[in-house]
Image (cartoon, coloured by chain):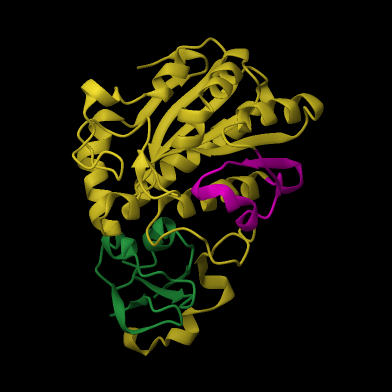
Amino acid sequence: MAKVRGEIVVDIERCKGCEVCIAACPVNAIGMSKEVNSKGYHYMQAINDKCTGCTNCAIVCPDGVITVYRVKI
Amino acid sequence: MEENIKKDNIRKEENLVYIKTKLMTDKVLSYCPGCGHGTTHRIIMEVVDEMGIQSETIGIAPVGCAVLAYEFMNIDMQEAAHGRAPAMATAMKRLMPEKFIFSYQGDGDLAAIGTAETIHACNRGENITIIFVNNGIYGMTGGQMAPTTLPGMKSSTSPYGRDVATMGNPLKITELIAQLPGTYFVTRQAVHTPANVRKTKKAIRKAFENQKLKKGLSFVEVVSNCNSGWKMAPVQSNEWMVENMFPFYPLGDIKIEGELVK
């Protein structure tokens, strides 16, 4: 069975840290950063390699900060 | 072998599956973290992008939180006086019948000060699309009670909860306008989960395509959260919305192709 590997790229400066993406992620691959961006928000980031590139996080992101890549391996 | 795939190798143009549409400008949205307005803006722009009608679409911004919508949507837009967006949309559609005209309004704009314009535009059956974002509160001005505020719901002007005996009943404007003969497609959706976002996008696409048919007005209500106004964290407010808003404002199509289905 072909496996998929996803990768997210986050526009850190535009992320407002609402955590809606974390609730939407089916594989718990997203967490919040310890650092803050220039506006003082903790931003979302990938915390492990479980991402499957399902785009759920990007679809619910109110600010559209997430870009998703997916590759079959 | 699998572990050897480097992140840089995945981040390539050919592997791209989702990126924010170019029809959204790069300006940072003025909305609070977790607000459904941003998602709604983005899916409208995705629909316009997919239909290839950027140069033929004119949006009308309301007064309310979305007053700066023209800053974020990269299409022709016009700001309307408070509540008067359907009247302006009527004029635009009649002058330019080949354009796709939509108004984007909140509940304070559409269901309070603009009730007359909304009802009459719907009753006349103008061939426009109305996107109605309902969060049950006046978000921009500080969380005051709106006509759509739920019974018992706390707001800054109903701190002990909305008392129906003195403050009146919440207005289900979507059910109300679905009764009018001029509406062709009336639906209520939400944007808090990926599945709901996809359904809402389909509904908005249908609402835009209906403008070509010239059979009446398409109305899409989006039940949204207002975490600042409700004094909750974004995820918590979404849960509160599911538990409290959806029983009163049930999701689903109300009128399809001019026939009531609910």
Q: How many marks?
A: 0
Q: Please say if B193 is above or below B173.
A: below
Q: Quadrant of the N terminus of chain B?
A: bottom left
User: Outermost residue toward the top?
Assistant: B181
Q: Where is residue B21 shown, x and y percent of the image?
A: 59, 59
Q: Is residue B203 magenta?
A: no
Q: Is residue B83 above or below residue A69?
A: above
- Which chain is yellow in the picture? B
Chain depicted in green:
A
Q: Position of residue B68 (x, y in %)?
A: 59, 53
Q: Residue at x 41, y 50 (%)?
A: B36
Residue B193 spot, x, y in % from top left: 33, 50
Where the C terminus of chain B falls, by quadrant? top left
Q: Position of residue B252 (x, y in %)?
A: 36, 29
Q: Is residue B207 left or right of residue B228?
A: right
The magenta segment: B52-80
Confirm whether residue B57 shows in the render: yes
Which residue is at a point 39% across and 20% down the rendered structure image?
B175
Q: Nearer the viewer, residue B247 or A6?
A: B247
Q: Image check: A67 left or right of B91?
A: left
Depth check, front residue: A51 or B53:
B53
Q: Is residue B69 magenta?
A: yes
| Residue A49 appears in the picture as rendered | no
Q: Nearer the viewer, residue B62 or B215?
A: B62
Judge left or right: residue A51 versus residue B61: left
In the picture, residue B72 is in which quadrant?
bottom right
Residue in view at x 46 percent, y 76 percent: A9
- Judge by depth and name the residue closer to the eye, A36 or B242: A36
